[in-house]
Image: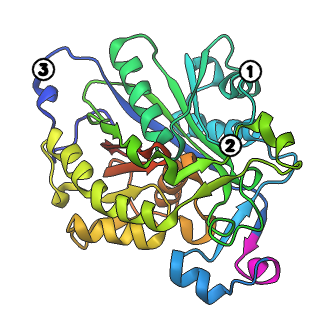
Amino acid sequence: MTDAPAAGRSRVQAEPGGRHARIVGVGGYRPRRVVTNEHFGATIGLSDEWITRRTGIKARRFAAPDETLAMMAAAAADKALAQAGLAAADVDCVIAASMSHLVAAPPLAAEITGLLGSAPAAAFDVGAAMAGFCHALTLASHLVSAGTARHVVVVGTERMSDIIDPADRSTSFIFGDGAGAVVVGPADWPGIGQVVWGSQPAGMHFIEQQAPWHAAGDQDGEPSYLRMAGQEVYRWAIGAMPDVARQAMALEGVTAADLRAFIPHQSNLRICDALATALDLPAHVEVARDLVDMGNTSAASIPLAMERMLASGTVASGSLALLAGYGAGLGYAAQVAWLP
């Protein structure tokens, strides 16, 4: 697609000779192992009916040992590059968003770059938890728009099963594993809108790792798991994110009627539906519900949902979507983008 969509043209689109960015390809990787809600009836005594009613989740994927963060990310990125008609050698930068990478060095993005065969592309990680993909997408858009890079791979990749306590009756059934990727490339119109982002550190303990990884030995050998205050996160998300989303649309001069898709972080179906209701989305706007059989895949959830909506034909190439990420920190980011 070379022409700017008619609906919701940004003010900057009227500027002659501008350099802009858009998403040119998307791909996903879903681990082989499917874990249904019945699994948790056997392990922590929660029924399929209870989990579905509370979260909307029926199943999720758990990665096998060979399905590493980098392997899943590279597989998703390969698909995104293929859709864009690009080769690994065309990649100038790889940005990885993840909250389940368990080492500080080397960066996860460097390993992904090696698997892709994109060296000597720049490679760095973004640690913004569930909002990480939208943060990384913003950085990629700026890199391309500034001419610093021509093609940037943005990957959200998670093995949440590594950092969740399997005995935790409040979180163990929520999260899943997987990876989603997009390629951001140059355009003569801005295909990725301005971001509205921020944080509310007063609530940063609502989602947190209970202790540093190196402190596990001081806890009688217990791993350091992620913990979440679910009700507090729910109230914050449905209270704060609608206004963030409205600001993102307003920056680009679009309304809910211009949208064809709403792709929020796949945290909980009740939250996704509450946000759609608060935004008063028209019936023609499709709301992503990838979490029903994937669970909450954190930084991977938005690109995975995007990939499914396009592959299934739920939305068409060139559709205008509203993206909204939120989570630990409490960090958030929202922007509109035209789908590849």
Residue 41: say if magenta: yes
Q: Secondary structure at mark 1?
A: loop
Q: Tag 1: residue type?
A: Pro
Q: Quadrant of the C terminus?
A: top left
Within-10-Å neighbours for mark 2: few <14, some 14–19, many 20+: many
Q: Quadrant of the N terminus?
A: top left
**Residue matched to label 2:** 100
Q: Tag 3: residue type?
A: Glu
- Foreground of the two, 133 or 73: 133
**Residue matched to label 1:** 106
- The Cα–Cα distance between marks 2 and 3, rounded to whole angstroms, is 41 Å
Instruction: Give the residues drawn in magenta, as a range.
Output: 35-43
Q: Secondary structure at mark 3?
A: loop
Q: Looking at the picture, how far across and down is residue 292, in whole percent?
A: 56, 72
- Foreground of the two, 66 or 334: 334
- Residue at 31% over, 65% down: 275
- Residue at 39% over, 19% down: 144
What secondary structure is the stretch in magenta mostly built from? helix
272 lies left or right of 307 = left
Within-10-Å neighbours for mark 1: few <14, some 14–19, many 20+: few
Rendered view: 77 above or below 247:
above
